């Protein structure tokens, strides 16, 4: 590798790091907003100001959830259309992710209250870490970590039985989508879009570990939805251990 190539590679790495840090900054803003919601909606004080803040948030959080959910869906459709015609899709995708994150946070805060808020503090941090993985780590690990992460989250919702069935079902669909994306990439030698010549994964990528991870993540949530909350609780630890094993595997693979 000559000097020019090294400089170009360093420039690309710097750009990737900067983009990852932007997602981390966004996660920090979202964490700060969650702190405010936790203070004035979950742990509000029995004063006139505290009760008024609670009532206002109770009124507007469901509205925020619905508006951002619709916005995320429209942005996702826009992203798909841009991909099909070979146009730029970065901003629509960022909008879909950001709006979707806000919708998830608002929904969990309204429906699951205190336990949901405690989970959200961890979830937003995990989202930031996943974003950093996308930019500075192996892409196949990013996909595997996404499937594992959705599995852990689906198991958390499965602990609530029928009350969490909708969320668990949606996360099951998300895991299945990651698995189908992995199969698509395998079929097309890692190319996400032929029109844009967008190479998402290297051509010689091994998909066995990724596909097994998607299958195990999917199976864990389905089993928990059928077997009940105790099984879901213990499977959460299994999937966290699986995620750690993935991290070790891909780290060793890079050496």
Image: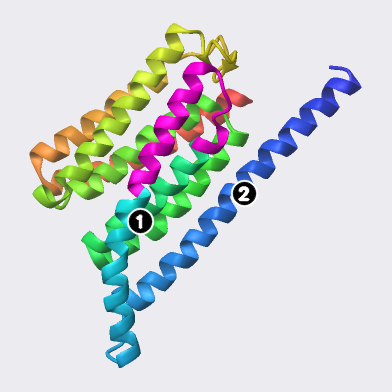
Q: Position of residue 30 (x, y in %)?
A: 48, 59
41 shown above or below 218: below
Under circle 2, the secondary element is: helix
Name the residue carrying label 1: 105
Q: Residue at x 57, y 22 (%)?
A: 87
158 shown above or below 214: below
Mark 2 or mark 1, which is nearer the start of the sequence?
A: 2
Name the residue carrying label 2: 22
- Is residue 176 one of those drawn in magenta? no
**Quarter holding residue 245:** top left
**Direction from residue 202 to residue 247 in the image, left or right:** left
Q: CA distance from mark 1 to mark 2?
A: 19 Å
70 shown above or below 16: below
**Direction from residue 229 to residue 205 in the image, left or right:** right
Circles 1 and 2 in contact, beta carbons < 8 Å: no
Which corner quadrant holds the C terminus? top right
**Direction from residue 143 to residue 167 in the image, left or right:** left
Q: Residue at x 30, y 92 (%)?
A: 47
Magenta stretch, main secondary structure, is helix
Range drawn in magenta: 69-92
**Quarter holding residue 196:** top right
Q: Position of residue 233 (x, y in %)?
A: 21, 48
254 shown above or below 85: below
Q: Position of residue 37 (x, y in %)?
A: 37, 70
Furthest-right residue in view? 3
Within 10 Å of disc 1 (Cα), the crowding (few <14, some 14-19, many 20+) is many
Which corner quadrant holds the N terminus? top right
Q: Position of residue 80 (x, y in %)?
A: 43, 25
Under circle 1, the secondary element is: helix
Q: Residue at x 52, y 40 (%)?
A: 94
């Amino acid at each position: 590798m000559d000097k020019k190539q090294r400089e170009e590679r360093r420039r690309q790495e710097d750009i990737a790091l900067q983009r990852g840090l932007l997602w981390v900054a966004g996660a920090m803003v979202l964490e700060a907003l969650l702190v405010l919601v936790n203070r004035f909606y979950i742990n509000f004080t029995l004063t006139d100001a505290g009760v008024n803040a609670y009532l206002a948030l109770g009124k507007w959080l469901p509205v925020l959830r619905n508006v951002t959910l619709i916005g995320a869906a429209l942005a996702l459709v826009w992203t798909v259309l841009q991909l099909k015609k070979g146009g730029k899709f970065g901003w629509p995708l960022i909008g879909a992710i950001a709006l979707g994150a806000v919708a998830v946070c608002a929904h969990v805060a309204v429906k699951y209250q205190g336990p949901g808020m405690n989970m959200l503090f961890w979830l937003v941090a995990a989202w930031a870490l996943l974003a950093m993985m996308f930019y500075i780590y192996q892409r196949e690990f990013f996909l595997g970590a996404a499937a594992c992460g959705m599995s852990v989250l689906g198991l958390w919702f499965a602990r609530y039985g029928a009350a969490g069935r909708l969320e668990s079902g949606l996360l099951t669909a998300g895991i299945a989508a990651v698995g189908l994306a992995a199969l698509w990439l395998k079929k097309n030698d890692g190319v996400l879009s032929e029109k844009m010549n967008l190479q998402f994964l290297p051509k010689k990528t091994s998909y066995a570990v990724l596909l097994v991870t998607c299958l195990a993540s999917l199976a864990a949530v389905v089993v928990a939805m059928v077997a009940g909350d105790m099984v879901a609780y213990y499977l959460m630890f299994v999937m966290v251990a699986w995620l750690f094993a993935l991290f070790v595997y891909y780290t060793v693979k890079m050496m």
